[in-house]
Amino acid sequence: METPPDEHRQARPPVAFISHAACRLHQMSPGHPEQPARVAVIADELRARGLHDFLAHYDAPRATDDQLARVHPVAYVEHIREKAPAAGLEALDPDTAMCPETLEAALRAAGANVLAVDLLMSGRARRAFCNVRPPGHHAERSRAMGFCFFNNVAVGAAHALERHGLERVAILDFDVHLGNGTEDIFRDEGRVLLCSLYQYPLYPGMNPPSVAERIVNCPLPGGSGSDAFRAAVTQHWLPALEAFAPQMIFVSAGFDAHASDPLAELQLTTDDYAWVTDAACAVADRHASGRVVSTLEGGYDLQALAASGAAHIERLMADATS
């Protein structure tokens, strides 16, 4: 077993790990790539690396209707509740379906971000990883799609702005698919900087233009690897983040740009996810008192997901007690 660095041996674990058993019950169909094992393999890999017990573990609460209503109309939230089946599957689009356990999992996934923000703002944790599903970044204001029902990261960012009074938050999305839902929700919100890096063309088939000082979109063609990824972050994300000086950073942590992932053609490595995490944490240390809330999005090769997710979390832990 790998021995954790000395900074992981603190009496008060500085990084929160937020999950819930309900997230393992949501199932869209047998053999679906967005499967319950996705959250399990990350936790298992953390145990194998000797890191699991050095995290502060929390059960995700349910997001309240008021918390969801900051980013989704009340009518949409009611629509999702009404669609929840008592048995079987209820398809919302060709890629997105609900089983009887889906609503509970989706509420917990969104609520994880609310708890993470509260923990960071209270000083009980400096960083957080939300090991939850279903993912959220494709969920638009009034539309479920792309395996997503509620926009988990958007719920957390809105909570930071409205409940805690932050004036500037940044969302970094390195999932291989454009986070169209997050952009739909925050495109006209000046308090949010959204930086996205994704393969194009690819689902959801959108490549919207960047918006000065608010949205930095970096599409990459299939086959792009580490050099193109790191250049886009260095040349486009980091200058925008320094100029914006966010008071909290949110990460839509999709690991499906990994070379082993079956749903895309980017060629990233586990080291790339560690590198971009270090870059995000460095910005957070300069401008946001170290505050980073990261949430699982995509990642469908279980071995690559486990390795990349654990490497990401290990870097969140690396200097979180300094």
Image (cartoon, helix red, strand yellow):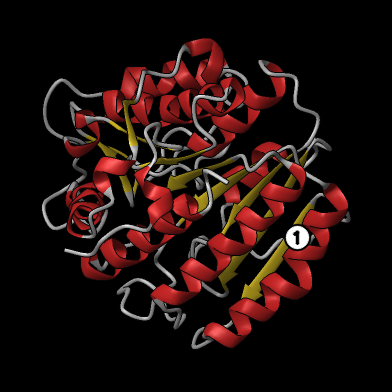
Give the structural element (helix, strand or loop) at label 1. strand
Which residue does the image show at 73% across and 64% down from the upper left? 237
| Residue at 13% over, 58% down | 31
Which of the 4 quarters of the picture holds residue 32?
Answer: bottom left
- Viewer-proximal residue, 260 or 87? 260
Query: Which residue in the structure is indicated by mark 1?
Result: 216
Of the residues shown, which amino acid type is indicated by label 1?
Val
Q: Is residue 62 visible?
A: yes
Q: Is residue 219 left or right of residue 97?
A: right
Does residue 17 lie above or below 46 as drawn? above
Q: Is 313 drawn above or below residue 198 in the view shown?
A: above
Residue 23 locus on image (x, y percent):
25, 35
Q: Provide residue 170's location: percent of width, then percent of height.
A: 70, 45
Residue 195 spot, x, y in % from top left: 69, 57
Q: Residue at x 16, y 48 (%)?
A: 29
Residue at (30% x, 74% y) in the render: 262
Mark 1: few/some/many CA within 10 Å (<14, 14-19, 20+): many
Question: Is 215 drawn above or below residue 176 in the view shown?
Answer: above
Q: Is residue 287 above or below residue 81?
A: below
Count the marks: how many? Answer: 1
Instruction: Using residue 13 as the reference point, say whether residue 76 is left or right of it.
Output: right
Q: Nearer the viewer, residue 89 or 127?
A: 127
Quadrant where the N terminus is found in the figure: bottom left
Closer-to-camera residue (99/11): 11
Q: Position of residue 130 (x, y in %)?
A: 40, 39
Residue 297 visible at all: no
Toward the viewer: 276 or 201? 276
Q: Quadrant of residue 314?
A: bottom left
